Image (cartoon, rainbow, N blue to C red):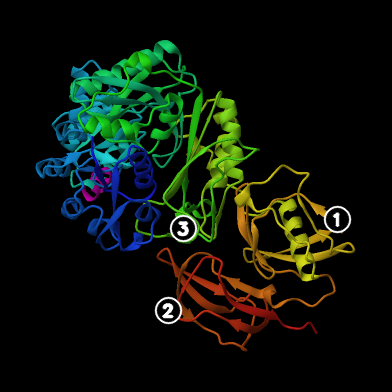
Amino acid sequence: MISKLLIANRGEIACRIIRTARAMGIATVAVYSDADAKALHVRSADEAVHIGPSPAAESYLVGEKIIAAAKQTGAEAIHPGYGFLSENADFAQVVMDAGLIWVGAPPSAIRAMGLKDAAKKLMREAGVPVTPGYDGDDQSAERLQQEADAIGYPVLIKAVAGGGGKGMRKVDAAEDFLSSLESCRREAKASFGNDDVILEKWITSPRHIEVQVFGDCHGNVVHLFERDCSLQRRHQKVIEEAPAPGMDAATREDICAAAVRAAKAVDYEGAGTIEFIADASEGLRADRIFFMEMNTRLQVEHPVTEEITGVDLVEWQLRVASGEPIPKRQEELSINGHAIEARLYAEDPAKGFLPSIGTLEDFHVAQSNRRHGPGRVDTGVEEGAEVSPFYDPMIAKLIVHRDTRKEAITALADKLGSSICYPVKWNAGFLRNLVLAEAFVSGDVETGFIERNLDDLLPALQPPKDVLEAAGLLIAARAAGSDATETLDLHEGWTPPSAGFRLNAVPRPTTVRVGHNGEVHEVELSGRSVWDIPIARLKRDGVFAYDYLGWSGLFTEVRFDGGQASAADGAIIAPMPGKVIAVDVAEGQVVTAGQRLMVLEAMKMEHALTAPFDGTVTELSASEGGQVQVEAVLCVVEPAEEG
């Protein structure tokens, strides 16, 4: 058995591998870039080695540095996780040539499955059903146009070396084919250095079904049943579940047997996934499920398979890499219940899912409490960590396992609604809406569902009325000097309405003006003393953050009717992390409504911040060249007196 393991990765997958290795008594070595010097995976490992600057191309993708770190620390084996170097056959070979154990697929299998055209030919020979299409050597535009016309539209153009949705184009009509081909080839060349393509018949009601397979060096191959990964946005999976809804026993037996044949055709060892596209227009049928590709590594969504089978796939990887046979025979594997995984990304759904970076001042993914029951959280970050712009924005995975699919959906939705992330934006509210969508609950979704229904799935841009009222009560009580302004801290979970928190300092009906994400809302308060909305927690006097069922933001101000406005009424707040590239005003300066106050550069765009009304700049905290966090108060404009 391996005694010391180097993990050539970062984030949640590195932490997940470390967890299993520790349980097996295997010492671990982490590697890290400048950006990850204080990362969770670095502190979780027994040893850590710095391998270079923040960009992955200068650190995590430099094979020589990885191997040098292994030799420096005496590690016997390298586990690549997924992404980065995990499917790089040349790197796998170099690892083995260096006398180290490669915890992954054989280089020959990686190469055999690495190009989609060659893989389809190999699968066809192995008796695995493949999607109708063209994968020939003649790559002339004329031949490809002829083949597309023969297949019939719509047709899908796919880069042979593609992945992650890059180098793919759907073509609906013959007259659009050549322009789409040119665009696809440009993207493929830039992304993969190879502009060859294959053509596939476009499946009108496609579901993404994949089968987990596992092989060893003794010639054994088993499957661990299927997963459904149909919920995708821009060809990226966001929700995965196992088993696939609507899969009958006969169809499961056929597709899983085909997956085993595929793995045996390349003498596969270790964890792998055979991905299929299913034409679900008439339900899941074996004669309408076709091979797409093989992922010769562990998958992001592997936890749902682990949950329904009771198997630790990383443990299996380490045992098989050490020369042991697969721990279980096929007849010893069975499906128990239903599991669903949600991928939590640091991104802002309200702004086109732009990545969100910054410090995780509040971060908690609901795992287990009395209301929601047990769950699993795989993450590589924790409260106080920095989300950098250098790597994939996935910061955590939330997995639930229940006896039935319905119970799993309910538990996952509840946990997503009770998780918190601030001030970094994330997609928890979007995912909650997604799993509660009627079509998903009924199991009637396919790969285009999100794009077609995106507007209905996005969380509301404004908080609901009850959240505003709760904010008004909380801030009003604090402004009145109450010491009874407790909030329910979501870090400990919360119970359904009936607990709530008490506010005894609002003696009469009144109106408060609550600032929310730069806008002002008038809120009528009735003088109630108990409120049941869970809100995150106070950040500082009169300012607090919340994340409630997907509505997240910052409350910053309050004004009683007939009272004097606080300076915060005109708070100018950074809409996202960025750099202040111009400041046009000074403290004490009189400004008019709409006048430019400063310019913020964020996400490679310039954003002019303007005065909300006539008034005077009473506070100015921003300076030219300074970096600011999302929702930081950059300056305050006090409104001019009326009359």
Circle nearer the N terminus (1, 2): 1
Circle nearer the N terminus (2, 3): 3
Q: Is residue 437 visible?
A: no
Tell me if mark 1 has few (under 14), some (14-19) or many (20+) residues whose alpha carbon lies within 10 angstroms of its own.
some
> Based on the displayed image, in which of its 4 quarters is residue 69 positioned?
bottom left
Tell me if mark 3 has few (under 14), some (14-19) or many (20+) residues whose alpha carbon lies within 10 angstroms of its own.
many
Residue under numbered circle 2: 625
Q: Nearer the viewer, residue 261 or 9?
A: 9
Residue 444 painted magenta: no
In this picture, which residue range is highlighted in magenta? 183-191
Labels 2 & 3 near each other (Cβ < 8 A)? no
Residue for point 21% across, 33% down: 322
| Quarter of the figure with the C terminus | bottom right
Residue 188 painted magenta: yes
Q: Position of residue 108 (x, y in %)?
A: 14, 32
Q: Nearer the viewer, residue 420 or 334?
A: 334
Q: Position of residue 535 (x, y in %)?
A: 67, 54
In the rendered image, the vertical position of residue 383 relative to residue 448, given as above or below:
below
Labels 1 & 2 near each other (Cβ < 8 A)? no
> Based on the displayed image, in which of its 4 quarters is residue 93 positioned?
top left
Q: Nearer the viewer, residue 252 or 78?
A: 78
Amino acid type for the residue under numbered disc 1: Arg
Q: Secondary structure at mark 3?
A: loop
Residue under numbered circle 3: 356
Tell me if mark 2 has few (under 14), some (14-19) or many (20+) residues whose alpha carbon lies within 10 angstroms of its own.
some
Q: Position of residue 154 (x, y in %)?
A: 36, 30
Residue under numbered circle 1: 528
Distance CA(mark 3)–CA(mark 1): 37 Å
Residue for point 35% across, 55% down: 42
